Amino acid sequence: MTAEPTTTQRTSGVSAGAGGRASRQHTLRERNLRLVARAVYDAAAASGERPDAVPPSRADVAAATGLTRATVSTLVDRLIAARLVAELPPVPAQRAGRPAVPLVPAPRTVVGLGLEVNVDYLGVRGLDLAGDVVVEHVEAGSFHDSDPVAVLGRLGSLASDAVARLDADGMRVAGARLALPGLVDARTGELEVAPNLGWSSLDPVALLGLTDVAVQVANEAKLAALAELAGDTPDSFLYVSGDVGIGAGIVVDRALFLAERGWNGEVGHVVVDPAGPRCTCGAHGCLEQYAGKEAILRAAGLAGDAPLESLTALLRSDDGAPAEQARSAVVRAGQALGSALADFVNLTGVSTVVLGGVYTDLEPWLREPVEAGLAERVLAAPFAPVAVRSARAGVHAALTGGAREVLREVVADPAAWG
């Protein structure tokens, strides 16, 4: 797993993290324990970009943190005892001396859970500290105008089953993040409104019924944006999550920008045409009515609940008028999306747009009209063209982002685990 989003990775593959050199304050041991944990986890994150990278040894961690080797050895032993760090078999030393013992995040010990309610599925995904999926269940459904008590109760049951399986396998659940497609108050965790679910003014955690797991709530697109931080994504970018609704997450210097209440990023309700069709939010001409998944499917001549594969098959085919209608629908969506995203880029100044959700599969056909809209409308485009790329976090990225956020907090406070 990756450590904190604010991590700066060194080319050696070992980083001291945002904490700087060794602390000399009264919380010396706890802060230095965090330094050592961050060094191991940051190196693991960097190795994902450099497959030939060798995990750090105690000596490497000492060099990265400025701590003495004896201190690092003591702290590493503590992390191993807490089952947060594991040792690999020794590797031969390049110089005279004892073989180096590589250090890696401990697999199958501590787990973060990502939970999600979306318009057409419920999901649970558990990641361990090594970044591997150790439990997952995604259940299809139709949750337009649904009963939050029933839906969240069902998700809570799925999560409880996952926790029981993990516990039986000797793994500890550190907590969970619940992703919802709507306005979530970052201060209270309450859902203010989720138009496509038909939900408003509720405390979703209470309805899950998870008494033994600490759950925090966040917007789906924002957690999906955090899932993109693993890899070679730029430090600052605008992540756009396309589904029935359209949300966005703004990442600046590898940290999520939430503003006062975390209600930013609602690009799906940017008005494209004031005289356009009525949106679920009550306004007219919102972007979702042109570039949301159901809107694209209907414009392509398909049912609004048709699988996305039906659309991509048409886009790849030579089936005359139906294929042409499908391509026209995606181009129209891309033009609307490019126009709305240009406003976001002009306001935020980010130079990379990441297309996530259904847009990842549609990117080969969306990219050109989106890029054209950005080039035409972004004031700085002639001097710094906006890059457009597909998301790389995989399907149901909010589940991954949520689980990683839980584990990030474990790495930030390893003293609490042993």
Image (spheres, grey):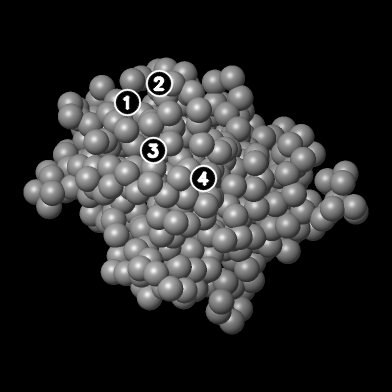
The residue sitting at 60% across, 55% down in the picture is: 10
Disc 3 marks which residue? 33
Cα–Cα gap, marks 2 and 4: 39 Å
Q: Kindly indicate the quadrant of the structure image that contains residue 97.
A: bottom left
Disc 4 marks which residue? 65
Cα–Cα gap, marks 3 and 2: 34 Å
Q: Which of pointers 2 and 4 lies earlier in the amino acid sequence?
A: 4
Task: Determine if residue 143 is in view.
Answer: no
Left or right placement of residue 360 versus residue 176 in this view: right
Disc 2 marks which residue? 190
Q: Label 1 neighbourhood size at 10 Å, few (<14), some (14-19), many (20+)?
A: many
In the image, 317 versus 180, the foreground residue is 180
In the image, 20 versus 231, the foreground residue is 20
Cα–Cα gap, marks 1 and 2: 7 Å
Q: Position of residue 159 (x, y in %)?
A: 21, 41
Mark 2 residue element? loop
